[in-house]
Image (cartoon, helix red, strand yellow):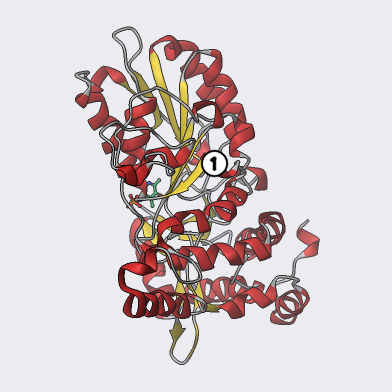
């Protein structure tokens, strides 16, 4: 593979010119740095704004000003059913059937709503398995749910320590934890991609292991959605949740999403209900009895925020045109190039935390600076000051995520050259 890459701007330029997806970059607004495009590697944190967002928002504002309440029924995309306009594209992105997904709320809210239904602890089985060092929301959510049901996180929260170099987690470690604790674990709750290490998990394998022990399985796909091609339905997961402002480019605080497997489409498990989850055909009879809509829609509480869904809608159209498989193919090569640059040109300055095996990662490389945290901070600040936008995660990780929709090979090379310059190498 390494022979396929070269660290010259002529080579990077030729790759960008030959890239079948290169036109998609023009559909995004790239934040400028000193009058030129910055090298934006932060799509894992806040994806960029599609140019189509502003006109889409404008159109909804026009409907509001011209139609008032009638906008719920009139206009090109009546607000009444607005969440349905993103459903098919969302289902394609996560590999689900359309009735298994819904765009609603935000990640943290959806996690709680899903746990209300799918974390049903009993005295014999009330533990939750998560990864140590999980994202704070995930930890707070599972811990507070455990307490809410009257159990003690000290015993009911099983946190799996990374067993591999760099703190990543092997499937064997998950298997061992389930062999040891499986009979008391009610829910396995793991990420699709770990936010700090960038490790991708094998969802299907995890579900298979967990089901062997009778555990429910939920996934947090914050860093996986729009990044890896997912096969959520086939994985057999009970539920999944995600946010849409990272790789999905849905905008700051965008409407999140949830997946509920088809086998639960008509579940009688408890849920927290609201009128928008009520069967659509009888919702406006305003009856006293809650009759849930079939599928994931039945977990909705409120009528959808149109101004927040409009950007997600146009962004998902871009994903439809690009296709997750094509995006992944480019992503493998683009992140592969970044990794090659780090290994071949910067190995005396940087080390990667993210697994080397491309099947075990998405777009993101988590990078550590040799020589400790202070040097890491110094490099990070140097990069930011030079228009190379990544992010910093305590204690010592710089996350750099070339995203295939708008990043170029030239961006990866610019990163490598800036690091060499900082380190006094070139
Ligand atoms: C980004 C992220 C979140 C954010 O949650 P919000 O409810 O959208 O604020 C939660 N969990 C993980 C793993 C994340 O990466």
Tell me if residue 235 comes above or below residue 257 in the rendering.
Answer: above
Question: Residue at left 49%, top 66%?
Answer: 77
Tell me if residue 232 comes above or below residue 426 in the rendering.
Answer: above
Front-most of residues 138 and 115: 115
Q: Where is residue 364 in the image (x, y as percent from the top left)?
A: 54, 56
The answer to whether residue 135 is visible is: no
Q: Quadrant of the N terminus?
A: bottom right
Q: Where is residue 290 in the image (x, y as percent from the top left)?
A: 32, 33
Tell me if residue 329 comes above or below residue 159 in the rendering.
Answer: below
In the picture as drawn, the residue positioned furthest to the bottom comes out as: 35
Q: Please give the residue where the numbered disc 1 appears in the rendered image.
A: 99
Q: In the figure, residue 31 lies in which quadrant?
A: bottom left
Front-most of residues 30 and 89: 89
Front-most of residues 344 and 100: 100
Q: Where is residue 414 in the image (x, y as percent from the top left)?
A: 57, 76
Q: Is residue 17 left or right of residue 174?
A: right
Question: Residue at left 50%, top 31%?
Answer: 265
Front-most of residues 17 and 242: 242
């Amino acid at each position: 593979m390494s022979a396929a890459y070269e660290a010259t701007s002529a080579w990077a330029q030729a790759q960008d010119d030959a890239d079948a997806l290169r036109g998609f970059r023009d559909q995004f607004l790239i934040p400028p740095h000193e009058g030129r495009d910055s090298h934006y590697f932060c799509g894992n944190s806040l994806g960029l704004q599609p140019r189509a967002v502003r006109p889409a928002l404008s159109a909804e504002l026009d409907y509001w000003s011209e139609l008032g309440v009638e906008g719920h029924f009139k206009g090109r995309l009546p607000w009444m059913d607005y969440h349905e306009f993103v459903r098919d594209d969302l289902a394609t992105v996560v590999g689900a059937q359309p009735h298994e997904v819904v765009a609603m709320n935000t990640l943290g809210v959806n996690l709680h709503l899903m746990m209300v239904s799918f974390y049903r602890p009993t005295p014999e089985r009330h533990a939750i398995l998560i990864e140590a060092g999980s994202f704070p929301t995930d930890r707070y959510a599972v811990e507070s749910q455990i307490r809410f049901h009257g159990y003690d996180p000290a015993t009911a929260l099983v946190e799996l320590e990374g067993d591999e170099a760099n703190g990543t987690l092997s499937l064997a470690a998950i298997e061992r934890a389930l062999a040891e604790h499986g009979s008391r674990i009610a829910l396995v709750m793991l990420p699709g991609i770990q936010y700090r290490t960038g490790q991708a998990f094998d969802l299907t394998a995890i579900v298979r292991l967990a089901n062997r022990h009778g555990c429910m399985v939920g996934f947090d796909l914050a860093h996986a959605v729009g990044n890896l091609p997912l096969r959520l339905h086939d994985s057999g997961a009970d539920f999944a949740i995600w946010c849409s402002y990272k790789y999905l480019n849905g905008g700051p605080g965008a409407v999140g999403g949830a997946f509920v497997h088809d086998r639960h489409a008509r579940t009688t498990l408890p849920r927290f209900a609201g009128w928008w989850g009520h069967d659509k055909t009888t919702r406006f009879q305003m009856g006293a009895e809650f009759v849930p809509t079939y599928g994931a829609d039945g977990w909705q509480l409120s009528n959808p925020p149109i101004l927040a869904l409009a950007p997600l809608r146009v962004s998902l159209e871009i994903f439809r045109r690009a296709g997750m498989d094509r995006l992944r193919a480019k992503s493998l090569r683009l992140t592969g190039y970044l990794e090659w640059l780090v290994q071949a040109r910067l190995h005396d300055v940087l080390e990667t935390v993210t697994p080397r095996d491309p099947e075990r990662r998405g777009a993101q490389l988590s990078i550590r600076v040799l020589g400790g945290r202070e040097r890491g901070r110094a490099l990070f600040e140097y990069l930011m000051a030079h228009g190379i936008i990544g992010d910093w995660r305590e204690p010592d990780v710089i996350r750099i995520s070339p995203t295939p929709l708008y990043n170029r090979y030239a961006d990866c090379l610019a990163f490598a050259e800036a690091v060499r310059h900082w380190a006094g190498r070139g």
